[in-house]
Image (cartoon, coloured by chain):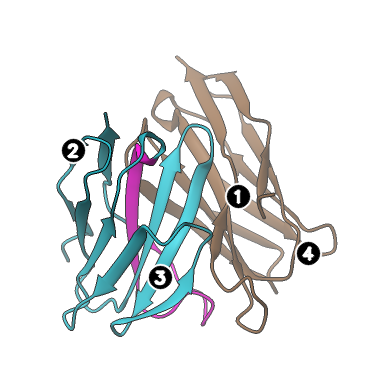
Amino acid sequence: SQQGEEDPQALSIQEGENATMNCSYKTSINNLQWYRQNSGRGLVHLILIRSNEREKHSGRLRVTLDTSKKSSSLLITASRAADTASYFCATEGEMKTSYDKVIFGPGTSLSVIP
Amino acid sequence: KAGVTQTPRYLIKTRGQQVTLSCSPISGHRSVSWYQQTPGQGLQFLFEYFSETQRNKGNFPGRFSGRQFSNSRSEMNVSTLELGDSALYLCASSLSRVGVGNNEQFFGPGTRLTVL
């Protein structure tokens, strides 16, 4: 099964509301990254959080990481229609383990209704 | 800096044919990773190249291969195409190897391959 798994699979909210997506993973990681993808196009890197960090902010994005629970959350505040996209979490494993590559979760499809 | 470029953007092939996709990383980036994205399997790691050597490989058959040139440009080849190979193929570049340090990966727009 995949290393990272997002929850929920799909989310629909009104413009201006906050959107929260969760990601769980299974093994030790170097870092966890969140990406956005618009309608089958390339991925855009949003934020990287290292394994020794607990929270990180970037503009309207807030990411938390709980390594004891092997989970992360992405919060998008004051959502806009332009935030409509699929959001993926990806874990980068430690070099000393076999998971020394980036593994993506199945993604959360976010729809922001104007 | 120019972003990651991939050519061609769209490709239609028939079963049994072979295909070569190209990826030019961001200038100065030495790592290129390839991913396959399908509706059923999601984003799956194919392989990573760094300094012209394959460093990591995902769980794909030997029909999928790649190489990297001295200028860090990379190509991916799929031989004996099957219907299930229809997918969006994404490449990503980063400064150093996956798993070394904390690298941001920059993705190209992808090549959409359709196998008929």
Residue A48, numbered label: none
Counting from the top left corner in percent of width and height, residue A98 is at 64, 75
Chain in brown colour: A
Crowd around label 4: few <14 · some 14–19 · many ≥20 (10 Å):
some
Disc 1: which residue: A62
For residue A75, say whether it is visible: yes
Q: Answer above or below: position of B49 versus B112.
A: below
Give the image quarter of residue A39. top left
- Please give the range of residues in magenta: B85-106
Residue at the location (26% across, 58% down)?
B77
Chain B is which colour?
A: cyan
Disc 3: which residue: B48
Disc 4: which residue: A67
Mark 3 lies on a secondary structure that is: strand
Q: How many marks?
A: 4
Tag 3 subunit: B
Please say if the residues under marks 4 and 2 sit with CB atoms less than 8 Å apart.
no
Q: Amino acid at mark 4?
A: Thr
